Image (cartoon, rainbow, N blue to C red):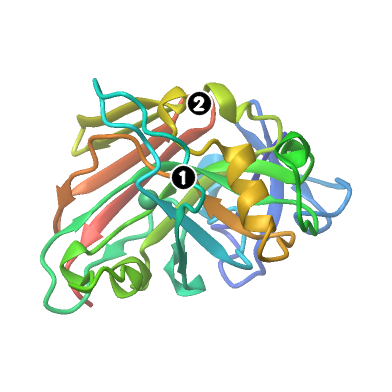
């Protein structure tokens, strides 16, 4: 099931709602993302809606340096991954601008598989991880490296408003193990990596994170980006894509 969150263009002031994408049409759901699916009977064409980030995250948890460089042996799985949080104001949807922070002219995009947690989970074993994943979507983990602190803290550079485009859909049946992750800028390919190159796999990430914090429905884990993440500036258009999961395109805009 591929689930989108949207507002009909004809009803721009109406509340966001969820829909299941089937053959190019969104079948409107009566309830929330984690409710048993019940349809209202209304359908919308994709051209007739504004897509939003498919989940309103509860936490956004990022993982750094989690893919092996091409041509190099994969390093051992670390006991402790590099982990950071992005504030909820980073989450935007397909087509929304990535707005550069004041005095920053360039940022890096990172195309990633984002895991959406579907149930409360604590001390999950890797073999149990699939049972707590609601689905996957595409994320762009935008980073202002010029705002990384010289002592190594990434927080500000990962945290700026609009720095986490998500979407276009959550696929509840996506097989993350075979994901192929791509990105392009202005149509020029930049990233093309395989989940096989991930250092700490998603099931082990969930085990690790749930070992120190309770995961809750709506938590989003950005699982890391393959080689090729590159600089972009105002006027560029970034497309992050995961084969079979979707394409997420966002323009980069000058500071508001
Ligand atoms: Mg990242």
Question: What residue is disc 2 on?
Answer: 179
Where 70 sits versus 210, above or below?
above
Q: Earlier in the sequence, mark 2 or mark 1?
A: 1
**In the rendering, at what x and y percent does residue 238 appear?**
27, 45
Where 201 sits versus 12, above or below?
above
Structural distance between the alpha carbons of marks 2 and 1: 22 Å
Please indicate whether residue 227 sits to the left or right of residue 1 in the image: left
**In the rendering, at what x and y percent does residue 101 appear?**
22, 74
- Secondary structure, mark 2, is loop
Question: What residue is disc 1 on?
Answer: 78
Q: Nearer the viewer, mark 2 or mark 1?
A: 1
- Location of the N terminus (image quadrant): top right
Give the quadrant of residue 20: top right
Where 35 sits versus 127, above or below?
below
Please indicate whether residue 250 sits to the left or right of residue 177 in the image: left
Please indicate whether residue 83 sits to the left or right of residue 221 in the image: left
**In the rendering, at what x and y percent does residue 47 appear?**
50, 42
Please indicate whether residue 256 sits to the left or right of residue 41 in the image: left
**In the rendering, at what x and y percent does residue 222 appear?**
49, 50
Where 217 sits versus 241, above or below?
below
Can residue 43 be seen in the rendering of this structure? no
Q: Nearer the viewer, residue 31 or 182?
A: 182
- Are there few (<14), some (14-19), or many (20+) residues within 10 Å of tag 2? some
């Amino acid at each position: 099931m591929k689930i989108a969150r949207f507002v009909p263009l004809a009803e721009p002031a109406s509340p966001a709602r969820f829909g299941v994408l089937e053959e190019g049409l969104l079948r409107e759901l009566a309830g929330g993302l984690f409710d048993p699916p019940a349809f209202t009977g209304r359908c919308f064409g994709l051209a007739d809606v504004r897509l939003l980030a498919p989940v309103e995250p509860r936490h956004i948890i990022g993982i750094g340096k989690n893919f092996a460089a091409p041509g190099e042996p994969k390093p051992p799985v670390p006991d402790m991954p590099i982990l950071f949080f992005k504030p909820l104001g980073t989450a935007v949807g397909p087509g929304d601008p990535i707005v550069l922070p004041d005095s920053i002219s360039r940022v890096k995009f990172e195309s990633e598989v984002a895991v959406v947690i579907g149930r409360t989970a604590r001390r999950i074993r890797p073999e149990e991880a699939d049972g707590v994943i609601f689905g996957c979507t595409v994320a762009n983990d935008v980073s202002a490296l010029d705002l990384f602190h010289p002592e190594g803290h990434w927080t500000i550079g990962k945290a700026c408003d609009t720095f986490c485009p998500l979407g276009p859909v959550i696929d509840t049946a996506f097989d993350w193990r075979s994901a192929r992750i791509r990105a392009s800028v202005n149509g020029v390919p930049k990233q093309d990596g395989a989940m096989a190159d991930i250092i700490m796999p998603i099931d082990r990430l969930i085990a690790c994170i749930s070992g120190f914090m309770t995961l809750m429905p709506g938590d989003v884990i950005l699982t890391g980006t393959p080689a090729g993440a590159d600089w972009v500036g105002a006027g560029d258009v970034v497309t992050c894509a995961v084969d079979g999961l979707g394409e997420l395109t966002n323009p980069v805009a000058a500071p508001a």
